[in-house]
Amino acid sequence: MRTYKITSLLVITSLALFSRSYGQKTASLKDSYKNDFLIGTALNATQIEEKDPTAKVLIPKQFNAATPENIMKAEVIHPGWDKYNFDLADKLVAYGKKYNIRINGHTLIWHSQLPAFMHGMQDADSVKQYFTNHIKTVAARYNGKVFSWDVVNEALNEDGTLRKSIFADKLGPDFVTEAFRLAQAASPDAQLYYNDYNNEQPAKRAGCIALIKKIQAAGVRIDGVGIQGHWRASNIPLKDIEESIVEYSKLGIKVMFTELDLGVLPNPWDGDAADVNMKATYTAKMNPYANGLPDSMQVKLTKGYEDLFKLFLKYKGTVSRVTFWGVNDGQSWLNGWPIKGRTNYPLLFDRNYQPKPAFDAVIALKK
Ligand code: 9MR
């Protein structure tokens, strides 16, 4: 009787310990990869303000780099012509300092998520003034406070030509170089990066290489290129990724994987992109895993992450950071894009912050 009581007490205690909030026994990504590259995550406002108790423990244990998912974008940080809102960005900097997490500012110049006052702006002088003021003000404020900047985001089309945007239209094709020139002057201590999706694909990569060479030829500093890494678990372009690491590193710059997630849902156009303007209509057929991910897909996802991290490790030193676009599956933008209201499973932690088999596989590569 006594033995039974003691045993059940032990079982109950260990169950309680096991189901206690995240963090007791889980291995750490950033510690496992500390000699290889930084491990980052995108952060939302709730996480920056430490309002979620599990995320509060998990993030500093797992990550040593962070990128704000939205709060440093122009529409948030620069809502009026002369009006800036630095509240959350300042909190992010303080958060990074508290936990020794390197902050990558995202992003200074992007055609998307522009402030309302920029919509429909017609005269080139006003666009130029906005462009200059924005970079000078924001980059200068965070000089010495953020580790790096995505100076320009997504300036290229899939064929490698310059995307049509308010900046290309009104400022001309040199706007990318000019953005880096201004960022360098305002934030001399920050690493300066160009960031895009699909720039591991040969045509877009060639355009990206030409863009970087143009910046370098102008005598302007660029320290790295970000390949976002919004791929599908069933279709990871490993060969293109490897070629890209090699080709970009020949330019004397670092390569980063800046927004990594591996979607498992069908794509209406059967393609890989991250253009936030692409949208499609919801049908139940397009949301096949609403009640859970089948083992076959879990295995595919796990293998996908394993293959990718093997490749990243092969090029450690050239690859300086790998950042996931979100902490857990429930927060991923892929639940809402390109179809709203789906259930996707693209990250290493599930909706309850439990590490998935893909997490174990990534950790196991370092054991
Ligand atoms: O994850 C971001 C999502 O919350 C926003 O609604 C969206 C709006 O533009 O931007 C998402 O992040 C994008 C990133 O800033 C740039 N690359 C593509 C990302 C996914 O769309």
Image: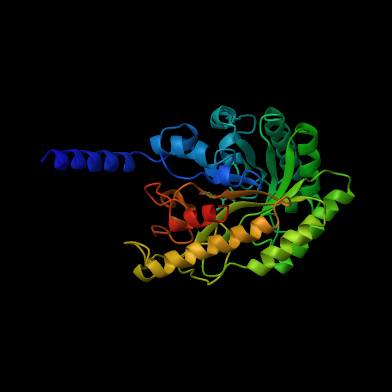
Residue under the point 37% across and 71% down: 285
Q: Is residue 121 visible?
A: yes
Q: Is residue 347 visible?
A: no
Where residue 138 appears, as percent x and y from the top left, is 67, 33
Q: Quadrant of the N terminus?
A: top left
Left or right position of 94 against 207:
left
Left or right position of 98 against 153:
left
Where residue 185 appears, as percent x and y from the top left, is 80, 34
- 350 lies above or below 116: below
Residue 155 occupies quadrant: bottom right
- 155 lies above or below 125: below
- Could you say which is closer to the camera, residue 290 or residue 283? 290
Where residue 76 appears, as percent x and y from the top left, is 56, 37
Residue under the point 60% across and 61% down: 308
Residue projecting furthest to the left: 1
- Could you say which is closer to the camera, residue 1 or residue 365? 1
